[in-house]
Image: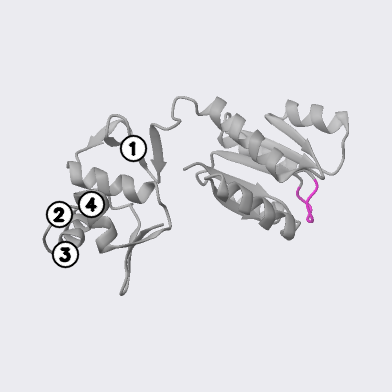
Amino acid sequence: MYTVAFVEDEKDLSNLIKTYLVSAGYNVVCLTSGHEAMDYIGNKVDIWILDIMLGDDISGYDIIKEIRKQDKVVPVIFTSARDQDLDKILGLELGSDDYITKPYSSKELVLRVNNIVKRVYKEDNNKIIKYDIYNIDTEKRIVSIDNKEIKLTTLEFDLLLLFLNNKDKCFKREEILEAVWGSDYFGSDRVVDDLIRRLRKKLPKINISAIYGFGYRLS
């Protein structure tokens, strides 16, 4: 799942765009000021959306300059209420990938994000899932850190994939049993607890939480 950092001081617009991006399958971090955005630089972000004019003394231009000091290639989309060629030119010179003028269509912004993600991360699309420090190759069924493979059993990998493809969704033990072991499995659902314990041990950065009285959730 790709992470979008959306920097916008209009909270209603921010919430609206977040809804559309989440529906399109993105993890979205909303930042409502230049200072918040500056503090967030350095975290894992796959694409930034920056409003040029923010409510404090830091502009989108200041933010992209700081981003580019740490990451030369992460995509950046500028948004602005001003439709001026100078803004677009300056944005491109500072390393932005796109520019969209307010008021814009939520669907159009999502389409632009989709197009940039497909272009920039084309080798990873549908095959590589990034979670924290882990790279999960869904085609080769390999989990690695810095090209060093972490050995998982078939059941462990199937369980991991179930959670990664349904992040933040709560699963009952019975649902995990059916998805991982199959509908013809007969036995105690406590095998789920044991498998999760083993997965946590091998991948300690995987944040699988036990939901009391219900089951498990990856966040």
Is residue 169 at all visible to an observer of this figure?
A: yes
Q: Earlier in the sequence, mark 2 or mark 1?
A: 1
Does residue 128 show up magenta in the picture? no
Q: How far apart are the two marked residues, 4 and 3, measured between alpha carbons?
A: 14 Å
The residue at the point 64 percent across, 40 percent down is 110
- Horizontally, residue 178 falls left or right of residue 114, namely left
- Which tag is nearer the camera, tag 3 or tag 1? 3
Tag 1's secondary structure? strand
Residue 146 rendering spot, x and y as whole percentages? 33, 33
In the picture of the structure, the residue carrying the numbered disc 2 is 185
Residue 96 got which mark?
A: none
Q: Which residue is mark 3?
A: 190
Q: Is residue 63 visible?
A: no
Residue at the extreme front of the image, as rendered? 184
Q: Secondary structure at mark 3?
A: helix
**Label annotation for residue 136:** 1
CA distance separating discs 3 and 2: 13 Å
- Label 3 packing within 10 angstroms: few (<14), some (14-19), many (20+): few
Which image quadrant is residue 24 in?
top right
Which quadrant is the C terminus positioned in?
Answer: bottom left
Question: Would residue 65 be found to the left or right of residue 21 on screen?
Answer: right
* For residue 120, above or below residue 100: above
Give whichever of 2, 86 is nearer the camera.
2
User: Which residue carries the number 4 mark?
Assistant: 199
Of 176 and 123, nearer the camera is 176
Cα–Cα gap, marks 2 and 1: 27 Å
